[in-house]
Amino acid sequence: MSDSPSKFKPWAVTVSGLLVLILGLAGAKALEISQAIAMAEAMPEHSEVVELASVEETNYVPRIQLLGTVSAPRQVTLRSEYPGTLRVVNTAFGARLQAGDVIFQQDVSEEQARLQAARAREKLAHAAFKRAEQLRAANAVSEEHLDNAQAELAVIRADIGVLESSIAKKTVRAPFAGTLGLHPFRPGDFVNSNAALADFVGETDNLWVDFSVPQTYPELPVGTTVLIRPVTGDAAAEAKVIAMSSVVSSSTRSRQYRATLAKDQSSLASLAPNGSLAPNGSVAVDVPVTSDSTTMRIPLSSLRHDVNGSYVYVLAEDESGNGYRAVRRPIVVAGEKQSSVFVREGLQAGEVIAGAGAFKLYDNVLVYAGTRHRGVELATSSQR
């Protein structure tokens, strides 16, 4: 019986050692956790840095952009009236011609020879008619003789008119002052009747721009101002609607309009270099679809979207007076133009919102402008 205490002594030492080890580990872990908590409490709150933007009140006219075609008020395609061989071909491509200048002429040698003979006969018939008048005045010839002389002169003059008309129809002249386009013809080429020879554009103080507006939009009154732009570019010139089609196209369900664009506008200089103002060239036409309204303008970088719609982050000053708090605000967008967004509902003029960098924000996050928390400066210019 005296040996029993000695048997339990090793077990007591082992259990005591385990308890000491467990308590030591628990104490170390507790110390580690307390230090982590203290470190977390000492760290600053998570924050984001964005550019600030101010909400501005402005008038906005909703517009749609359509494709238009430029045409000249005086623009014709010169054509041949008769088949024949070309003898005269004007190759002054791009040169300014006066009204009446010969551009093309077919072989008219036969008509000119017959015309020369007819004019000789006219001269003889005219002399005979004058003698007949004198003889009739002296009652030396009958009235019938005078009538025959007069009829003969009239017939010859009619023949001259036919020949001159034939020569004129085989001669293509400039219908008005303008510029001759390119053509492939040379003297000796044969052309058929009604063959297209060349384009000819007259000199005018304005251009026409034709465009079509879908019937789902309101009708444009005559006199409405539209903006003409190159297909690629931001330059714009004003044009006035001068006419519209009386019917809607059955194939496109749109109504055609014509606007006049004055050539003396200073903004035309930025449109012309790319050739968009040449006849048959394409231009973009900005058409107003409603009257102007008061809206709020914000940068495009401020606008965010999700399944619930469009929104921005309004920045409210933090209670500490250091930084801002992001507050999500739903908005109703009226339209966009280049780098600006026009808001119909949801914002007021003067409010501060997040600009570039708004994609990083979420509701109630701490926000700084230009510098991070703890004074680390950001190159905000690199975000612009």
Image (spheres, rainbow, N blue to C red):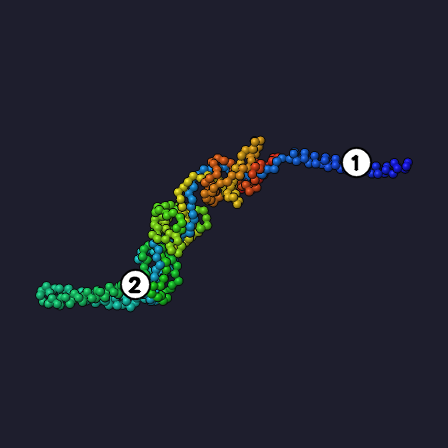
The total number of labels drawn is 2
Q: Which residue is mark 1?
A: 20
Q: Position of residue 326 (x, y in %)?
A: 55, 37
Pick whichever, 342 or 166, lies toward us.
342
Q: Amino acid at mark 2?
A: Lys
Residue drawn at (34%, 57%) of the image: 76
Q: Residues within 10 Å of mark 2 (few under 14, many from 20)?
A: some
In terms of secondary structure, where does tag 1 sit? helix
Observer-side mark, 2 or 1, equals 1
Q: Amino acid at mark 1?
A: Val
Pick whichever, 356 or 376, lies toward us.
356
Q: Position of residue 338 (x, y in %)?
A: 47, 45
User: Where on the picture, by quarter, is residue 109?
Assistant: bottom left
Q: Position of residue 364 (x, y in %)?
A: 56, 37
Q: Quadrant of the N terminus?
A: top right
Q: Is residue 168 visible?
A: yes
Q: Which residue is mark 2?
A: 169
User: Where on the picture, by quarter, is residue 3?
Assistant: top right
